Image (cartoon, coloured by chain):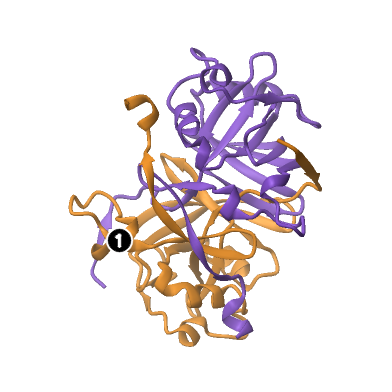
Chain colours: A purple, B orange
Amino acid sequence: MAKTTKKPSTYLYPAPVILVTCGVEKPNIITLAWVGTVCSDPPMVSIAVRQERHSHQLIEETGQFVVNIPGEELLKATDYCGQVSGREVDKFTATGLTPEPASEVKPPLIAECHVNMECLVRQKLELGVHDLFLGEVVAVHIDEKVLEESGRRVDYSRARPFVLTFGEYRGLGDALGNYGFSVKG
Amino acid sequence: MAKTTKKPSTYLYPAPVILVTCGVEKPNIITLAWVGTVCSDPPMVSIAVRQERHSHQLIEETGQFVVNIPGEELLKATDYCGQVSGREVDKFTATGLTPEPASEVKPPLIAECHVNMECLVRQKLELGVHDLFLGEVVAVHIDEKVLEESGRRVDYSRARPFVLTFGEYRGLGDALGNYGFSVKG
């Protein structure tokens, strides 16, 4: 397989696309894709945020944020929240997304997102142009309409999450197999 | 939207699925999904690895690893490398995946993966059951067959990456829109 060598850069794909809410009096929404789970116990996520972003300041001030996972029906609002600054625009008003009170933190949840994860900042790492906030998940809310009948997990065909590749959003395709299928026959 | 509240846990989805290579004399492959980009300059990725994993020890010893991104044609090998331990199995032999020399680090690349990112460990964070390794990307290799004609970016329809949701692998669907479409009309 012939390969070409590129300048070191961020080629890891695909990335989940989430909406992070932060701030209290004038809460803001920021769209992020450089995020991920970093520990299962305690449950923790990481979000990378550029220092100059309005949301960076809000997260620093409160030490709290909420991860809200949108479905495809929120694609346009999600893209918009990554394009404009909360310094200039009230993104809840501009998108019509609805803030609702969280249970353990001060920033609001986004009502229209299927999953909301309330987080407390445990560490901030200054890595370069991005700072990495590590948040412990302290409460999770899931839209009952996207839960499987067992109530145990999300039905992704209904939740319809999407990813960001290089400059492009994509939905998910069909299920390819269950985790562990290679050794379970 | 009626929501149910869950015990705090790791609900962030979907997660990219990658193969990490590590070690030198007897290199190993570990399948990971709790990974992500954490900084663009310097380009950095994070990978969460449980302390008891064989690969954890190998990454600690060398301070180096390689992120290899598989396509759907490697789904079974990818699942397998997440199910068995390198203490017991030579996963290159078992899967038929081909190790090839990296340019800047000692662990091998996986030839069959479309993208290889060579990484140097810059930090290790002990978060709980997982440790988080932060790696700086020092070299990137891309299969010419999945590069767009411009040579600038990967054609994901050809590279066919896949994600892990709760216990299930899924491919990607169609493109939904370009980053920034909401403000560009």
Q: Which amino acid does label 1 sit on?
A: Ile
Quadrant of the image occupied by residue B35: bottom right
Q: Which residue is drawn at 78% across and 43% down?
A: B4
Q: Quadrant of the C terminus of chain B?
A: top left
Is residue B33 among what the camera can see?
yes
Q: In the rendered view, would you say A2 is above or below B98?
A: above
Question: What chain does badge 1 belong to?
Answer: B
Tell me residue B179's x, y (percent).
38, 36
Label 1 residue SS? strand
Q: Which residue is drawn at 44% across and 57% down?
A: B172
Q: In the rendered view, would you say B130 is above or below A47?
A: below
Tell me residue B145's x, y (percent).
24, 65
Is residue A139 among what the camera can see?
no
Quadrant of the image occupied by residue B133: bottom right
Q: Residue at x 55, y 42 (%)?
A: A71
Q: In which quarter of the image is the N terminus of chain B?
A: top right
Tell me residue A176's x, y (percent).
51, 69
Q: Residue at x 67, y 21 (%)?
A: A61
Q: In the rendered view, would you say B40 is above or below A180?
A: above
Label 1 neighbour load within 10 Å: few <14, some 14-19, many 20+: many
Outermost residue on the left side: it is B149
Tell me residue A126's x, y (percent).
55, 35
> Residue beneath label 1, please?
B142
Q: Nearer the viewer, residue A56 or B132?
A: A56
Q: Which of B137 and A103 is in front in this view?
A: A103
Left or right side of B38 for A39: right
Left or right side of B81 for B144: left
